[in-house]
Each structure stands twice: as C-alpha cells, then as structure tokens.
Amino acid sequence: MVPPKTEYSLTELGKTFVSIVKSLCKWGEDYFKCNYSIIIKRNIL
C-alpha cells in the first residue's frame, strides 16, 4: 500500500527565516574556507 502524498510549505512567518538561514550557511562556508587547514590539522571533521 502506498502512503498518501503529503505536501509541506512554509508559513509567511517561516519564510522570513529563510534569509537568516542563508546568511548562516554563507558564514559557515566562509569560516570553513578561512580555517580549512586548522580544521584538518586538528581532525575536527
């Protein structure tokens, strides 16, 4: 038996959080690029 298809969407309030999450992702990418050698040296990953 196949479960029914469910669709999800963000509320208007949830959509206001998208830009914050994108900013955090950008910060993480920049941090990783700047600190890659330290991260590898300390075996953090």
Image (spheres, rainbow, N blue to C red):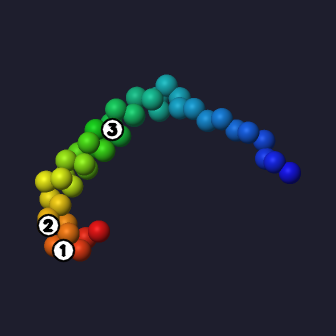
Instruction: Say what secondary structure mark 2 lies in.
Output: helix
Mark sitting on residue 22:
3
Residue at x 19% of width, y 66% of height: 39
For label 2, count other residues whose C-alpha is less than 10 Å away and answer few (under 14), some (14-19) or many (20+): few
> Hey, what amino acid is under mark 3?
Lys
Q: Are marks 2 and 1 in contact (CB under 8 Å)?
A: yes
Name the residue tied to disc 2.
Answer: 38
Query: Farthest top residue?
Result: 12
On the image, the x and y values in percent for residue 3 come to: 79, 47
> Hey, what amino acid is under mark 2?
Ile
Instruction: Say what secondary structure mark 1 lies in.
Output: loop
On the image, the x and y values in percent for residue 21 come to: 35, 40
Q: Marks 2 and 1, how far apart in space? A: 6 Å
Q: Quadrant of residue 32?
A: bottom left
On the image, the x and y values in percent for residue 22 come to: 33, 38
Horizontal side of residue 12 vs 44, given as left or right: right
On the image, the x and y values in percent for residue 8 come to: 61, 35
Residue at x 26% of width, y 42% of height: 26
Name the residue tied to disc 1.
Answer: 42
Instruction: Say what secondary structure mark 3 lies in.
Output: helix
> Hey, what amino acid is under mark 1?
Arg
Residue at x 19% of width, y 47% of height: 30
Horizontal side of residue 29 vs 13, given as left or right: left
Residue nearest the viewer, comparing 24 with 29: 29
Q: Is residue 32 above or below residue 19?
A: below
Please identify, in this view, whether the residue under mark 2 or under mark 3 is nearer the observer: 2
Mark sitting on residue 31:
none
For label 1, count other residues whose C-alpha is less than 10 Å away and answer few (under 14), some (14-19) or many (20+): few
**Image quadrant for the C terminus?**
bottom left
Q: Marks 2 and 3, how far apart in space? A: 24 Å
Q: Quadrant of residue 35?
A: bottom left
